[in-house]
Image (tube, grey):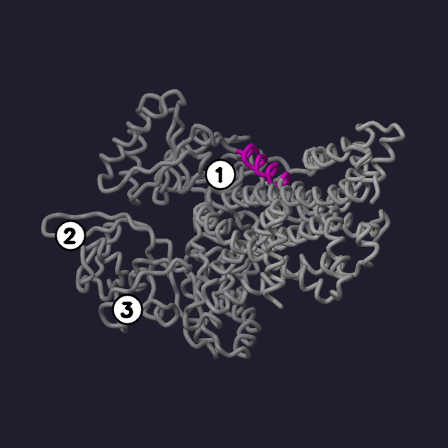
Amino acid sequence: MLYNYLLIAWRNLLKRKVYAAVNVFGLSLGISACMLVFALVAHLKSFDNFHPHADHTYRLVTDSFEGAREFYTPGVPAVLKEAFVQDFAGIDASVLISGGHNGLLAVSEGEQENHFLENDVAYTTDDFFEFFERKILKGNSNGILNASNQAVISKSQAEKLFGTEEAIGKTFQFQKGDVFAVTAVMEDFPDNTHFPFHILMSYENLRESRESGGWFSIYSDDQLYLAISDPEAKSRIEAGIPTFVDKYLGDKNKTNRTHWLQPLSDLQFNERYSNFTYKSTSYTVLHSLVMVALFLLLTASINFINLSTALSGKRSKEVGLRKVFGGNRRHIVYQFLSETGLICLFAIFTSLVISNVALKYLNDFLGAKADFAVFQTPSGVAIVLGLWLLVSLTAGFYPSFNLSKLNPVSAIKNQFQTKNSSSYVLRKGLVVFQFMITQFFIIGTMVLVMQMRHLRSADLGFQKEAVVSFSIPERNAEKSTLLAERLRNLNGMETVSLSFTEPASTSTSSTNAIMVESGEEYTVYIKPGDEYFIDTYGLDLLTGENLIKEDTVTRFLATEAFAKKAGFVNPEDMVGTYIKIGGIDAPVTGVVRDFYARSLKSELEPMVIYNNQHLFSTVGMKISGANANLVLAEAEKIFAGLYPEFTFEYIFLDERIAQFYEAEEKLTLLFLIFSLIAVLVGCIGLYGLVSFMAAMKVKEIGVRKVLGASSAQVLGMFSKEYLVLLLTAFVLAAPLATFLMNKWLQDYASKIEISWDLYAFSIVFVALIALLTVGYRSVQAAWSNPVESLKSE
């Protein structure tokens, strides 16, 4: 019997090739979106879930609150680890990792010295290997990082540095300082980890400098990981953290600092704290992608329903004859579900081809390495089969149920379709739902595009055009000063500045600023920079005097936000006021107009600029645009003369700022693509509805034409009906899109306002697309011969 159903289903599909192709195409788009998103989500959720203690590993993160301002960091004071483990029972294991140590490695071979610039470097202890699955390939597994000057490197790093895996006992020098001996070789890290370290060095070499800052020195890359298997112990630890903070900070806890345990599984999705890869995908983006994929699959299924019922007039006689010859309703349902199953099967195979091609581009675009390996497992096969069954039932149940209940006489005479039938109302409702989703995507995408345009053009408080920056390889004040002086002498070079970072950077530092007279303390961001910092980056000195060339800190520049925070209504009133930062008392000699120290997601923070040569690690160059390439070529020669071991790598400041919003740019493009797919799928559904309307109104059209109606009037009849559906969809979509997009915009301190013209564009765009979609079928119905439509059997 099943063979018979499938054979007849196959023959019916061959008879209606266009219908089958359109259904396969529509369904495959929805299924492809689901498969791609599922593969991406599976990849993101696989990060670090393979470690032995993954399900009960936590990172201790730090939150600070000062009035309405909030500060978040994944780092902890280096001195905290020992005290935390000592004060809290129930901690199975702990490890402190100090990551983000990029630098120059020197390997000596006889009289020759080879240099390598490395990024994936961290300081830690043996405890690292108790937490994270990194197999030791060469060397012992114990005592390999607990003593000073020890290092463990990956297999690929051993081959890179020494040309062989046999690297045990060999040495390298890091940043022209400590020399480390390789004690073990570990396997390379997998793609799905937040601990991408090729080189692990003994934390003993870093301990003294890190712990010298005590409880008030926090580096975001100094992160503490804890294994807590007992849920009750975890609850006790979380409840005891406030008491722990009071014990070690007491009255000095001016910023209401606290800590909490962040699960290891949250590292990939929590943008607030980031991770050692500095890449994360927010839960908002993840859930949005899942919802988009499900909506596309749902709209594709709706298309199938609309197209199937649009052909009900042609299939009604078949159903009637089957019933006349003894076929019961159950057999007819099986027959139509068989056809749906075949179409869905073809759609799944088609989507596998589309998805495999698209996944490569999606990985390149997102910088991910998702794959379809999950579908090759028993659970993956079950998911694919479940998807096939779900789509088959969702898309095929209503058409098969609706056609199988037809009265044989009415079906043979094709007298079952009426304008007021429940099926007709349902089809209109489904099209409204489709275009509600489509217009939601369009409005959402337009908001994303407009916000991205705003981020690129917004006033940041400093100049980002024609400014180039690069990192100083070594912390050597004399050499960096000489570098800046030589660069200033180049023709076409307007000015050069030495600073810790550019005005806006992902690397920020904050500290307490104490008003010497009142004793009030405020948390401020610090921007070490020289006397050329303001001119190079186009900052606006509102009042007072600029910084001067000096070896020690003798003056500060404050921003407007700091002046207001300290209670000065007029910025000039702050000039001459003494503040203390890092134990140094000095006057504020000038106030600078506010500028953004981070992305536009952040508020304008209170900041202090001061000259400290020992902290400078960035060179900023303001170049004449006409000679930029020549100036950069000359700058590279000067750099190579002073730092021959390093590569000259520069970036234009506007490109650096654009990197802040790289994730948003990618999200915008993804939503644009999904919006176009939603429009395409929606148009297929609309075409199905118009086809059904044309079939249902064939006699009405014939009568109207006999009575003198023109083709234009018939077209107007069709247009009026679908325009009402589009307006209904818009009325439903606009409030939902406005609510959700306003919620998304709340993440930005500087944002656009959603205006009426955005809604006008959405409705006009969809109307034009719909007009093109239904135009052919409407014209065909309007130009039909009334004799053919009115003749009876």
Tag nearer the camera, 2 or 3: 3
Residue 108 got which mark? Answer: 2
Magenta-drawn segment: 446-461
Nearer the observer, 773 or 115:
773
Cα separation, mark 2 vs mark 3, equals 25 Å
Residue 452 belongs to the span the image colors magenta: yes
What secondary structure is marked by label 1?
A: helix
Q: Which residue is mark 1?
A: 658
Residue type indicated by callout 2: Ser
Tag nearer the camera, 3 or 1: 3
Question: Residue 652's x, y, as percent?
Answer: 41, 33
Nearer the observer, 432 or 354:
354
Residue 202 belongs to the span the image colors magenta: no
What secondary structure is marked by label 3?
A: strand
Mark 2 crowd level (few <14, some 14–19, many ≥20, 10 Å Cα): some
Question: Residue 412's x, y, as percent?
Answer: 80, 53
What secondary structure is marked by label 2?
A: strand
Q: Residue at x 54, y 61 (%)?
A: 257
Q: Residue at x 54, y 56 (%)?
A: 348
715 to the left or right of 562: right
Residue type indicated by callout 3: Ile
143 to the left or right of 706: left
